[in-house]
Image (cartoon, rainbow, N blue to C red):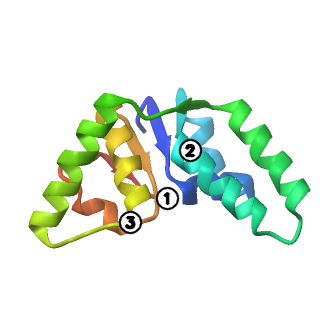
Amino acid sequence: MPDALLFDTNAAIGLLNGDSQVEQIVDNTDEIFVPVIVIGELYLGAENSGRVEKNLRRVDQFAQRYAILSCDEDTARWYGRIAAQLRSKGRPIPQNDIWIAAIARQHELTLLTRDDHFKQVDGLQMQAW
């Protein structure tokens, strides 16, 4: 198990929903990081839910628990590199996921995800559950 992980949105949702496999991974990992993009996707989900206020509070609590990684100029360089590489392969992935992959590559973190399309990103370390 890696010493540090970066959460994809589905891993964050799994943890918020009490997925025992994600909880076990968290318990056995020294550091958990969350891209600001994932926090935005969680807030979007909360805003579109039937229990907006309750879910917004859950996202607030989640965001306070883990280190949030934002985008900067280096992230933007990684984004451009990954997007160009995916385009040359003819294997696009969602834009937000390119940003998430860029943060993972920039910080040399293993991405915890269930999304197979991340396998298209060269050099990205992944862990599924």
Q: Which residue is denoted by mark 1 in the rendering?
A: 129
The secondary element bearing badge 2 is classed as helix
- Percent x, y for residue 120? 23, 62
Residue 20 in sight here: no
Say what amino acid the circle numbered 2 marks: Ile
Measured Cα–Cα span from mark 1 to mark 3: 21 Å
Would you identify the image quadrant in which residue 13 lies? bottom right
Residue at position x 25%, y 40% from top?
78
Q: Secondary structure at mark 3?
A: loop
Q: State whether residue 122 appears in this view.
A: yes
Whether residue 120 sits left or right of residue 30 in the image: it is left
Left or right: residue 124 versus residue 129 is left
Whichever of labels 3 and 2 marks the residue nearer the N terminus, that label is 2
Labels 1 and 2 touching (C-beta < 8 A): yes
Q: Amino acid at mark 3?
A: Pro
Kind of residue at badge 1 = Trp
Mark 2 crowdedness (10 Å alpha carbons): few <14, some 14-19, many ≥20: some
Q: Residue at x 44, y 29 (%)?
A: 3
Tell me the residue that label 2 is attached to: 25
Task: Check disc 1: other Cα within 10 Å, few if <14, some if 14-19, many if 20+.
Answer: few
**Image-quadrant location for residue 85:** bottom left
74 or 20, which lies in front? 74
> Could you tell me which secondary element the residue under label 1 belongs to?
loop
- On screen, 59 above or below 73? below
* x and y, in percent, of residue 100 in the image: 41, 48
Q: Nearer the viewer, mark 3 or mark 2?
A: 3
Residue, x 75% and y 69% (percent of image)?
Answer: 48
